[in-house]
Image: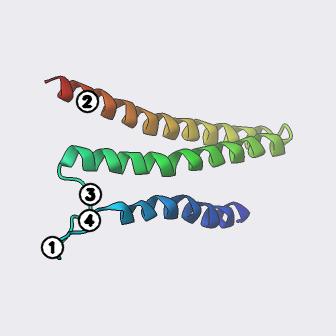
Amino acid sequence: MKFSRILAFVIPAIVVPSVAFAALCNSPVSGGLSNPLCTNNLSVFLANILKLVAQIAFPLIVLFLVYVGFLFVSSQGNPEKIKEAREYFFWAVLGALLVLGAQALSMAIKATVDQL
């Protein structure tokens, strides 16, 4: 229960600063509508979305790994609790690899398209 309370404070602290960057878009000079996405093509928009996901995911993964470490320490040799902590560790590492792999794949595709 305490972990969910901590996350309730940590997630907004991570998300709010990245949302504040939306104010950096240029407003129209002639009074017309402005582009709220600050991008003119889909690839830049998707790269920005992936960057935002990574900025949110990596601190959460670090917090989750700290929590898993706490589970290992608090298991005190109990095989059932160690098994549970190992499962949590596996899924935390898998999530980190998924986010990191998505970024690597995105950069590889972008580099390939830029060469064409």
User: Tag 1's secondary structure?
Assistant: loop
Q: Amino acid at mark 1?
A: Ser
Q: Quadrant of residue 23?
A: bottom left
Q: Which residue is mark 1?
A: 30
Q: CA distance from mark 4 to mark 3?
A: 6 Å
Nearest-to-viewer mark from 2 and 1: 1
Q: Which residue is mark 3?
A: 38
Q: Residue at x 51, y 38 (%)?
A: 96
Nearest-to-viewer mark from 3 and 1: 1
The reply, left or right, for residue 7 in relation to residue 73 is: left
Q: Which residue is mark 4?
A: 36
Identify the image quadrant of the N terminus: bottom right
Q: Which residue is mark 2?
A: 109
Proximity of marks 4 and 3: CB atoms separated by less than 8 Å: yes
Q: CA distance from mark 3 to mark 2?
A: 22 Å
Q: Quadrant of residue 76?
A: top right
Few, some or many residues within 10 Å of mark 4 (<14, 14–19, 20+)? few
Q: CA distance from mark 4 to mark 2?
A: 26 Å
